[in-house]
Image (tube, helix red, strand yellow):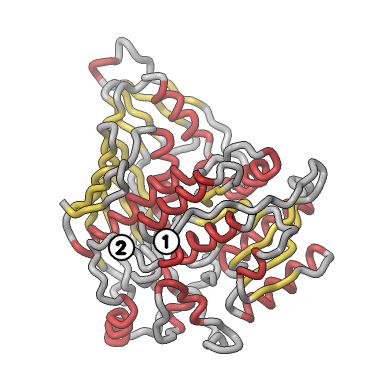
Amino acid sequence: MTHAPESEVPTPSSTSRRRFLGAAAALTGVAAVTSCKSTRTALAGPLPRAKSRAPLAADEPIRMGIIGPGGMGGGHLQAIIAANKAGTEKVKVVALAEVCKPRLDGALKSATEQQGFQVDGYRDYRELLARTDLHCVLIATPEHWHVPMAIDALAAGKDVYVEKPLCIKTEDALHLKKVVDANPDMILQVGTQYMMYQKYREAKKLIAEGAIGHPTLSQTSYCRNSKDGEWLYGIDPAVQPGEMLDWKAWCGSEGEVPFDTEVYHRWRRYRRWSTGVVGDLLPHMMTPMIWALDVGWPVRVSAGGGHYVFKDMENHDQVFLTAEFEKEHTMIVAGSVCNDTGIEPMIRGHKANLLLGGNNVVLQPQQPFVDEIDAREVQCTEGGDPQDALRLNFFNSVRTRQPNQSPIELACKAMVIIDLATRSLWGGGKYEFDPKTGAVHRV
């Protein structure tokens, strides 16, 4: 259920333009981009109530399951094992679930050998969730499975770490929020690791103190480049529907389509299965900025972009979006996989600006206020890997039941921007979101 790790050396796509267009037409479907209706019938009905959690003593190892231990999930697996060996946290990965047999077999072998005990494997994630000894699960599957699996896990009494983006559709994100809100004793954290950077905490303090006046405009970006294209993960020709892969389960509630090895191995390139640059890259930068600003929900979003270099990829290789918020603020965001020069992260206020391009926070007063506000630089310590820090933050929440640093409401705010920007990219126009009703409509 996961993509190959980003550290793999990309290989040129074998998909011709003609084959690509044919496959895209078959796989994308004819659903209008303006539709807010979800095909996820599993998300209908009453909100589930979580079963009792497995008891966890103060000195007891956390028992975790990973759903989707290939690609990103495999990276999490190795990092968690390393943290346990280093004594950073007492945690054991005791169960794995994966629809692809070679990936499951490889992850099981690695986890078992490194931890010194037999790790259990499942082809159906629901069998993993049925265990009563697990304290939490990590979900690192394709985006269309994040919300259904998270809901099932919470209902089974498991705390959840779910990868970003939260999903593909706004309404699914909001439904998950309702489930989380209905189960306040449960923990759910979204894997947006830049939330652990101190500079955003310092920026939030300065804004709350009124140091920059009313925050009017922010900007950020996530841009990278390659010779051959993005998300060209290696293809294993042995992975075919049947014993090697439960393709129907992989497709899930999005509906089964004819198998395409390009789609399975490189799903982030395809519109039906991913929002591409917008959902894979931009949440890293947008989410902590949204948190620091504290300007409410995004209420109006528009976007533009195109296929400027990598024309055999269905999702865009260059995007630029604008999001307006409840509390009179505008954010602009650029994303690219065909040029790695971004725009400096910055928050502009009526009285001063905050520059966030480095490790520290630089406050620069606007000219009319130079006699009232002193320029200064707030030193920040950004030691270590933010993803390691975010996982430890999650484990601390599992133990203490305290809120985590990357909660559901914040992820939902980012998801509104991701979804509405994607609709704008494909359908044109501007989209509005009503925070009170959750309704989306095209302006």
Give the mark nearest the N terminus, 2 or 1.
2
Q: Is residue 123 above or below residue 384?
A: below
Query: Is residue 232 visible in the rendered structure shown here?
Result: no
Disc 2 versus disc 1: distance between alpha carbons? 12 Å
Q: Is residue 301 above or below residue 243?
A: above
Q: Tag 2's secondary structure?
A: loop
The amino acid at mark 2 is Lys
Query: Which of the pair 35/7 is nearer the observer?
Result: 35
The amino acid at mark 1 is Ala
Using the rendered view, name the quadrant where residue 41 is placed: bottom left
Q: Is residue 424 above or below residue 233?
A: above
Q: Tag 1's secondary structure?
A: loop
- According to the picture, the residue beneath numbered tag 1 turns out to be 44
Please give the name of the residue rendered at 22% of the width and 52% of the height, measured from the top-left corner. Answer: 431
Foreground label between 2 and 1: 1
Q: Which circle marks residue 37 in the picture?
A: 2
Coordinates of residue 193 in the picture (x, y in percent): 53, 47
Coordinates of residue 260 in the picture (x, y in percent): 43, 84
Q: Quadrant of the N terminus?
A: bottom right
Please give the name of the residue rendered at 38% of the width and 32% of the height, measured from the top-left corner. Answer: 294
Coordinates of residue 28 in the picture (x, y in percent): 31, 75
Using the rendered view, name the quadrant where residue 117 is placed: bottom right
Quick one: label 2, few (<14), some, or many (20+) residues within 10 Å? few
Coordinates of residue 214 in the picture (x, y in percent): 29, 24
Quick one: label 1, few (<14), some, or many (20+) residues within 10 Å? few
